[in-house]
Image (tube, rainbow, N blue to C red):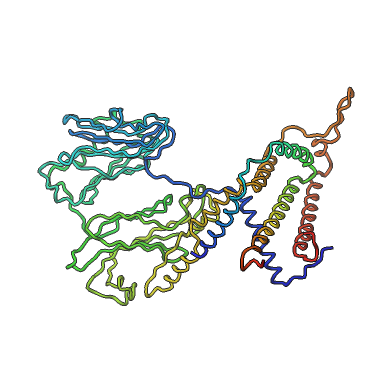
Amino acid sequence: MPVIPKLPLKEKIFSILSLLSVIFILSLLAFSPTVSYGATYSEGFDTLSTGNLVGQDTWANVSGGSIVVTATSTNTSSPNALAKPNDTGGTQKRAIPASDLGLFEAQVYLSNNNDTGTIGSASISVGTSTNPQLGIFSIRTDGNVRAINSLGTVLASSTVATAGWNTMKITWTYTTSLVFSMYINDVLLHTYTSGITGDIDTIGITFGNSTPYFLVMDDFLVQTDADVPVPDYTSRIDSMTYATSTNEVFVEGYWNYHEPEDSNVDELKIYQTDVLGVTNIVTYTATSSGAFSFTYEYNGIATTASSSVTLAYDIDVTAELSRLDLNYYDPFGTEGLDPTGSLYKTLIQKETITIGAETYDGNLDVRDIEGIYNLPEYACSLTELTGCLKNAFVWLFYPTQQASQGFENLKETLPSKFPFAYAYDFKNIMTALYTTTQTEDLSISYEFAGLGTLTLISEEMLSAVPYASFIKTILGYILWFIFSVTMYRRTLKLFDHNTTTQ
Amino acid sequence: MITSAFILLALYIVTTILNIFPTSTGLPASVDTAVSTIGGYVGMFDPIFPTGTMATIIGLIIVFELAIFAFKGFKWIFSYLPFIGGK
């Protein structure tokens, strides 16, 4: 009969809690499922995997001039990054006859399609500053379009006053097919859907003047000043989009910069609203007139996660475009007495997008809490002192990624060290034992010389026992009961200071 | 800051102690064979005896005993800490 320990209640509770904590930590280290954390996410074209590799390529509509392609490689096993069209590596230059108006392709890639490595740098340019050409640049990896730069120039007649143009740009989007959008002065001139789908590499250089690209060129030809569209110079937010893979919101629009004597300043304020309230406030101020494009990183699920995870709450990201009047002080405004934010403010436009219940790629483990909330930053001003206080507490008590990563490192180190490694090895052996499919009929038998074999007991025989399943269930209950009693007595013994055997 | 400091300090101490231990080369292959053989014979009784339950219980007991061992180890180390350890 176990002796009831004669310990103060406080000490008993402390001891039990300590023991449970150690059990929890050991269980977590030894038997927690494998999780991935801190996996590297690579963006861009320059990190390539084995396969049919294409680092960067371009199609250029060129009328005279040249295509210049340069490439270097940091790949040690196969150091030659090639630059097409001449396929001999290094810097390549291909002269284009003035009469040869059409589509050309240039590529940069590793010397062997099955190599793995990194192209250190690559650039492709067409035309010159005095002879601008239209270049359509795309960046691809393994045949898939990864990103398309919005770069390019416009073929224009020498009689057109191009100096008065505010902006020229071409954008490409690749969803179900490659779509071109052309702008002058931020006015959309034309959108062209190429109809090109799948692997563009299969289309390549064989296109000539009759290609869809050439039609793009026709639509983009500006011959007189009347062809130049009237620009829209009003401050506005044109679009808000988001990418859950990178936790980013993209805000595009147009704003105006006013000279100091005009006493007006356009301001864009972006913030997120979720279960934590309004956080992560970012403010931009116009320093020049023109189109703006900002990337706002919201606090969502960690982008390093690698299997399905659902966002547990909605995130509203709001963009407010306002005009501040430098001559008027507004002590009753939303910014209150904050000396930097108390200027009289006129809201021009307010747009909100909701990111919610999105499926992410990632394994959710306890450390992703950091990813979910990151380091929340609250609005802090004279009228929002609680936000300042919250920020202080966050800084004081919020564990950093370095701290959580330390657990991951410990979890990796522990199984490699004697004698802990033996526990892990034994666990692996046991796991393998119970996950291996048994195909043979197990039995214990005795062979009599010349008289045959007597099977004493076999799996087949045991399966034939009446009520075998019922007996198994009852035995399971009995085992759990014995285990419970044993553990109870063992726990009591732990705190029994009157016995010597613990 | 405070939480991180405690976590990092604890991790530093545990890692330092762990680094004292040699790196394991794994259990002898005969252990694997032995366990597999025993497992085969025990598995024969699975139609009538809850071998899975028994394995789970054995695992829990091992974890429990390891926890006690680790707890006592930490207590022993703690007792030698100056000023707060009591020795």
- Give the mark count: 0
User: Foreground residue, A293 or A21?
Assistant: A21
Quarter occupied by residue A211: top left
* Image: A478 above or below A384: above
Q: Is residue A266 left or right of residue A497?
A: left
Position of residue B33 measured from the top left corner of the image (x, y, whole percent): 72, 36
Position of residue A491 measured from the top left corner of the image (x, y, whole percent): 75, 61
* Image: A336 above or below A36: below
Farthest residue, direction left = A159
User: Foreground residue, A58 or A355?
Assistant: A58
Position of residue B40 measured from the top left corner of the image (x, y, whole percent): 75, 37
Residue drawn at point x = 74 percent, y = 70 percent: A7
Q: Is residue A454 left or right of residue B44?
A: right
Farthest residue, direction top = A450
Farthest residue, direction bottom = A331
Quarter occupied by residue A428: top right
Quarter occupied by residue A197: top left
Q: Is residue A377 left or right of residue A502?
A: left
Residue drawn at point x = 36 percent, y = 30 percent: A111
Position of residue A16 measured from the top left corner of the image (x, y, whole percent): 69, 64
Task: Tell me the quarter of the image containing the C terminus of chain A.
Answer: bottom right
Task: Tell me the quarter of the image containing the N terminus of chain A.
Answer: bottom right
Residue drawn at point x = 32 percent, y = 39 percent: A121
